[in-house]
Amino acid sequence: MRTFICMTAALASRYPEVFWPIKINLEVSGVEVKVIHKTENIWCRDWMPIQINGELFRFQYKTVEYSKWPQLDVSNEPWTGAFSSPIRTFPNIIIDGGNVVAGFGKVIMTDKVIKENGSSIVGQLEKLFNSQIIIVPTECGDDLGHSDGIVKFINADTVLINDYSRIAKRDKSFYAYENELENILRSHGFAIHKIINTYDLWDWNMPERQFRQFFPFADAYGPGYGYHINFLRVGSVILLPAMKIKQDAEAFETIRTHYSDCRIVMIDCSRISFEGGLVHCSTAGPYTS
């Protein structure tokens, strides 16, 4: 069985400090890296097939900024040649890959999937994925509704979530959000640990017009800065976003504590985070075939 992940050539061009450390560290660990061409959308997690329980699924990708920013168009399917296994396609179901955190027979998604597809979608997906679907609230201000910036599995009974205490000092709505998130996860039997979130350290007062001048490819006006939880685990390797700030060390220690059997590599995401994502967003997979 081989394991591979995918990244885009556009990522290598625009953010080599992200692309090359990921590629090198995965390849020395025996993980193949496939490079996808003919797209300027670096967030391949969102629009490439999702693999759960050995099966590949493709859903409709419908980013909120798709019509405004044509460079995000992935309709030419530049990734088609990456897969030898059949892909089950569901064009009438809207799901971004960033809203799928899967493991241990469970899939954690935000309620964005219900808002876009209706309440019956949960039962449909449980049958398709042969997994329990756990719905958590969409994070405050997140138009995309991704779960991969909210929660990660540590094991079958334990999850890692953001520590929202820093953000909540600037936006009090996060106090209620964090409480609701924890209550839902505990109701499903999970123990909870937290990782520092340093989103509060970016300039919240930057107008969107100015933001777009610097980051024209961003999916939405919502930087991913400080979301250390958006890491990628492939086997025993964890690629952890770093912001080039002193708090990176705390994020590293948290991951080392809860994933003690893994080798941890920090990836400089201080620039790419302003486009709305980090390591997990800019990779697709891991896939096995």
Image: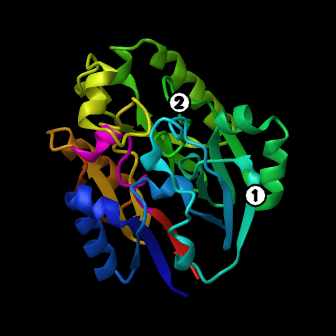
- The outermost residue toward the bottom is 1
**Residue 217 lies in the magenta-colored region:** no
Q: Is residue 192 left or right of residue 218?
A: right
Q: Is residue 68 left or right of residue 136?
A: left
Q: Nearer the viewer, residue 116 or 231?
A: 116
User: What residue is at 53 percent from the left and 22 percent from the top?
Assistant: 177
| Few, some or many residues within 10 Å of mark 2 (<14, 14–19, 20+) | some
Q: Which residue is mark 2?
A: 143
Above or below, comparing residue 203 to residue 192 in the picture = above
Asked whether residue 262 is in view, the answer is: no
Q: How many marks?
A: 2
User: What residue is at 51 percent from the left and 40 percent from the top?
Assistant: 192
> What amino acid does circle 2 point to?
Asp
Above or below, comparing residue 50 to residue 96 in the picture = below
Above or below, comparing residue 226 to residue 74 in the picture = above
Q: Nearer the viewer, residue 149 or 75?
A: 75
Of the 4 image quadrants, the one containing the N terminus is: bottom right
Residue numbers of the magenta segment: 271-283
In this figure, which colouring scheme has been used for the structure? rainbow
User: What residue is at 63 percent from the left and 46 percent from the top?
Assistant: 108
Q: How would you classify the magenta stretch by its main secondary structure?
A: loop
Q: Quadrant of residue 103?
A: bottom right
Asked whether residue 72 is in view, the answer is: yes
> What amino acid does circle 1 point to?
Phe
Q: Position of residue 266 (x, y in %)?
A: 24, 57
Q: Which residue is mark 1?
A: 90
Of the 4 image quadrants, the one containing the C terminus is: bottom right
